[in-house]
Amino acid sequence: MKAPDLFRGWKNRDTEHPPESRHDLTLFQVEVTETVPPPDADEPGPEIEPEPQAAPEIPPASESQEADEPPPRPDPAQAPLVFALPDTGALRHFKLDYFYRCDTLLVAVGWCTMPGLVPGLASNGVAIRTEAFPMERPDVVKSYALADDEEPLDPDTTGFVLIGRAGPDDPVELTWTVPGMDPERSDTLRPNKLPFNSFAFGVIADRLLDIFTSEPPGSPIWKSLRAAIPPVRGAPPSRARAHFDIACATADEVGGMASGWVLHAPDVHVWLEDDQGHVQTLHGGYRRYRLDVLTAFPDIPATDAHVGFFAHLPEARPGNVLAIWAVSQEGAWPLARMAASPLVSDVKEICKRLATIETPMTDLVKRAEFFDVPILSRALALQQAQWDRYDILSVDQGELPDAPLVSIIIPLYGRTDFVEHQLLEFIDDPWLRRNAELIYVIDDPRLVEPFRSQADELFKIYGMPFRWIWGQVNRGFSGANNLGARVARGDYMLFMNSDVFPAGPGWLQKLVRVLDDEPDIGAVGPRLVFADGGIQHAGMVNRWHEHLGIWINHHPRMGFDPAMDDNTGPVRTPLITGACVLITRATLDRIGGWDTGYVIGDYEDSDLCLALRDAGLAVAYLPEAQLVHLERQSFRLLGEDSFRLRVTLTNAARHQVRWRKYLGADGAAPQQ
Amino acid sequence: MKAARDMTAHRILTIAHGHPDFSKGGGELAAYNLHRAYSAAPGVEATWFLARAERGRGPSGRIVHRRENEFLWEQGMRSFHEMKALNQFELHGYFTELIQTLKPTVVHVHHYVFMGLEFLRIIKKIDPSIKLVMTLHEYIAICANSGQMVKTGTNRLCYASGYDDCHQCFPDKTPEDFWLRRHFFVKYFDLVDQFVAPSDFLRQRYIDWGLAPERIVTIENGQPRRDPLPPRPLAPGETRNRFAYFGQINQFKGIEILLRGLAGMTRTERKGIVLEIHGANLDVQTQDFQDRINALRAPLEAERTLYWIGPYEPRQMTDRLRNIDWVVVPSIWWENSPLVIQEAFAHGRPVIASDIGGMAEKVVNGVNGRHVDVGNAHAWGQTMKSVAADTVQWDRLHQGISPPLSHEDCAAAHLALV
């Protein structure tokens, strides 16, 4: 058999470097025969048909080519390279069936019956690191009529898959080396059109799914692979089911949220996707145990009983159709779909919606960390981004001190009848009247109009000047405090709840003295007592709540007779309440103000104290300054307990993620 | 402009929650009578009477001339829980102008109910040297239940207020709300220079509540000076068996207990007893209460044991007392210093009263009257039966009566405080 000298390089090297192997190789090319059927020939369907390949072209013998025109390189993608075994002269082949590029991922699928041939990929001649996988190709083996004495071909390893990476625009060539011969390479490969030919997918699915599932969903390569995976043909496999309990979305960047369940066999991979191509993983984070689902579908061998999913899809918008997709070796198919219902982008509305999603109490914190907190953080950030755009309404009742030493900042929410009781005490404190300016921050739109006349009446009766401001929107405890701080002129700022009442004069001066005398103290508060006289606050600590799985703000000795607290002077304590706390402007600026990332009101004070600790400052309470705190009156208008509890748990989750390094340092660490 | 004033002479403005022209409650009468007594007292240059009134146009805050030196004030209060004026605006207007115009040296406040407490501060703002005297007629600062110190619903007696205790009576108010309520009263009471209690019992209740003992004295309400009536002439064989109730008819006054005491006697026992009811306002009580009273009334009236006389004017009091032997005060609340006890004593009639509060203080058991276990219908029946049969006892108790404090002495006692 004549061996056409197709490749000059090969031929030259052949003469210059005698083969080292036992094979005396002869190279030639033959026409593609029907005995090696093009893979997938039986596959119908336009989507998955391989790109029609150009008819094999046998280039003219290179010897006759002109020297100044380099002959085209051999192209195993076009037609098999043919080798003759040296001892028997039997023909062997090397063929590239498919070459795909998914973003940076390169996938080459082919077969080779030439012993010792090592296929590879290169870019501009530089080898690309590839993983090579043997592949079963009984179809190839079957097409050889081997002589009895010939070594049989191994159907298990006849096929190969090469997987490598290259920049999306880098040219890629196929390379091959045969022992005793110089490495050779093809011209730049032209990739096949995606999606994967289902034959090719069938053989490379394992490895591709490994890659697919290890990539972050939504990454370019993930997306490229996602588009490349062929849809399942015919009936989808019965190894997965899913259901949406809820799917909703805001019209802004808070986006979509979905919950439901998805049950799938180990070889099925699932994710969440909307009809605009936005994707989200369903793995990791919080998953809920759903015995009901497992019981209803015993036929699906789930690997994990936690089949309830919670997903945040920030890019989704109302009306987008969310879907749970599955992929297995058969391809990809949708398991469940639901259009996202519209949700008002308001923190409280979102909280309410989140509260409707069933979750066992003991799981709420974990869920919040991965689901509720990221959603609410976005909602808060969006809402708060608007704050600075609003004009601040500021009304002065009377003439405030010219250069106050202290600014008393008191947010008002829900009710204003407390103000009169505070004024009744403030007017009896000459030092306070001389040195402090009083700022009420209305943080409740319902209060603005009634307070306008009330403020006037109160000033007329009590003669205590004060400023009241309205930031045009409810900002919560931290936001209202920060707004108050913005207009405050004092070097010291006393943040005070409206339901805290002095029991006599002198308390503010005492607190100021603590910060003056003790430079390591960043913030100081008074001792607080309830209406009935029992201790409400004499310092605060973080305490682990095993049942809920959260760190709670614990008030040691709460309800006790204040006489049982025999401390004197400033008492350094892990935390102090935010109900009444004095801090210098410099210190407050240094820690960036009150954190506004908590919903409705929880943990802001603990956060402030831990931020101070982070800045190397202590906090303390002063037993010699005692005020009354009608504690439970705050926020009593906010509604039912279960909702409040959920909000608290959400805040707790955020709090413990932020301050993990300090929590537990004060006392018993949680049992892990 | 008048000639230079005697700087030591008092100019006294009395403020009351009502005018006796319209409302003859004990507090209104005591305030008005004291105002009149001030006018006649030596060392008093001028006196005025300002009474809160409802004149069909709500709390306009306006001052209306009633007669010489008497004014009406159209003001209102928010509630017994929030003792705040409804009209804040005119506190700085008409009310302020009145004080600035009258220039009182003493403002004697008999009540703040229906007016709110803020006017006390307005007065002190206008002139801190104005002495504020406040007579406490009820337990309003202590108790949101109209100052009665009885439990809502059950009418059980209440011995002390407490944030949680009060919450039990008013479940829609939290204990903290009651802290606020008390705080408001305490801060306003701080403005008062002198408190007056018409009874030691009331004084002690306020001391227990937190008022410093040195800030409150007891001065009994005054009575017109008069000679006692002669004892009712007895026909041969007749006994001291005529009892009379005077006053409002409401659920706190114990009429029901009294009637049930009579109803619980045998017909024979009742035969020797006559009870007259001189009372007003049954018709404005709850239907349930009216029905209960009427059901008890009918058979007793048929038997001629009970005579339902009805309302009376103060000037009729003497005539009505002429033909009875005993005055009964069966209240089931504490009372303060019931005017009717002083009136009975002024007319020489012993009093049978519930053994609690201001009644037990003013009526000395076995000296000028008898005590009866409060709320105990059977005890009332038995007491009436036994005293009606015991003429000797009546004579002894009649002898034990001392004349009550006169208006003049009452005014003098007050003036000694300022």
Image (cartoon, rainbow, N blue to C red):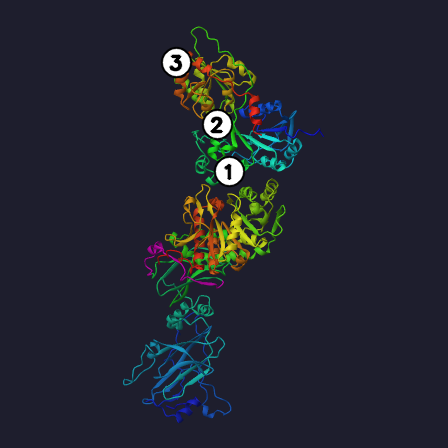
> What residue sits right under mark 1 in the picture?
B181
Name the subunit of mark 2: B
Q: Nearer the viewer, residue A364 or B114?
A: B114
Q: Are marks 1 and 2 on the same chain?
A: yes
> Circle 2 — which element?
helix
Q: x and y percent of residue B221 in the render?
A: 53, 24
Q: x and y percent of residue B318 in the render?
A: 53, 15
Mark 1 or mark 2, which has the lower sequence index?
1
Magenta region, residue range: A276-301
Q: x and y percent of residue A280 in the render?
A: 45, 62
Q: Are marks 3 and 2 on the same chain?
A: yes
Q: Nearer the viewer, mark 3 or mark 2?
A: 2
User: A302 left or right of B206?
Assistant: left
Type of amino acid at the residue the image marks with label 2: Asp
Categorize mark 3 by other alpha carbons within 10 Å: few (<14), some (14-19), many (20+).
some
Q: x and y percent of residue B345 in the render?
A: 50, 18
Residue B200's disc is 2
